[in-house]
């Protein structure tokens, strides 16, 4: 079992609007995702819904994930 996480940053109008999206895939099927515009994980499959509930219940983990807009996207803006 190998789950793959993919992180994406979307920049609209420079850094005026930044969106962070994290997707978890297995066998080319998206199980769950996080979208900073939504603010929490959303399950795309029954197993993904279970995982999303678990991730969303982890307060410290969710704070870090929500902060990724700044710590991951904005921080690396000049790199890309």
Image (tube, rainbow, N blue to C red):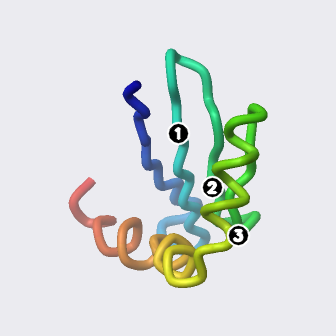
Which numbered disc, 1 or 3, marks the residue that appears first in the sequence? Answer: 1
Please tell me how crowded label 1 is: few (under 14), some (14-19), or many (20+) other residues with Cα within 10 Å. some
Query: What kind of element bears circle 1?
Result: strand
**Residue 13 at what x, y percent from top left?**
56, 64
Give the residue at the far top of this rendering: 27
**Mark 1 vs mark 2, CA separation in Å:** 9 Å
Q: Residue at x 40, y 66 (%)?
A: 73
Mark linked to residue 41 = none
Q: Residue at x 50, y 16 (%)?
A: 27
Q: Residue at x 69, y 36 (%)?
A: 47
**Left or right for 46, reference 31:** right
Give the residue at the far left of this rendering: 79
**Residue 35 at what x, y percent from top left?**
65, 57
Identify the residue under disc 3. Answer: 39
**Left or right for 11, reference 1:** right
- Locate the N terminus and report the quarter of the image it occupies: top left
Identify the residue under disc 1. Answer: 24
Q: Residue at x 78, y 34 (%)?
A: 46
Q: Front-most of 31 and 66?
A: 31
Please tell me how crowded label 2 is: few (under 14), some (14-19), or many (20+) other residues with Cα within 10 Å. many
**Residue 7 at what x, y percent from top left?**
43, 49
Q: Front-most of 36 and 2?
A: 2
**Residue 80 at what x, y percent from top left?**
27, 53
**Mark 1 vs mark 3, CA separation in Å:** 16 Å
Q: Front-most of 41 and 10?
A: 41
- Determine which quarter of the picture holds residue 18: bottom right
**Mark 3 vs mark 2, CA separation in Å:** 7 Å
């Amino acid at each position: 079992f190998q789950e793959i996480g993919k992180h994406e940053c979307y920049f609209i109008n420079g850094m005026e609007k930044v969106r962070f999206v994290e997707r978890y895939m297995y066998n080319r099927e998206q199980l769950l995702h996080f979208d900073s515009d939504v603010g929490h994980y959303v399950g795309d499959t029954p197993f993904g819904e279970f995982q999303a509930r678990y991730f969303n219940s982890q307060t410290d983990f969710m704070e870090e994930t929500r902060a990724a807009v700044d710590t991951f996207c904005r921080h690396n803006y000049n790199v890309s």
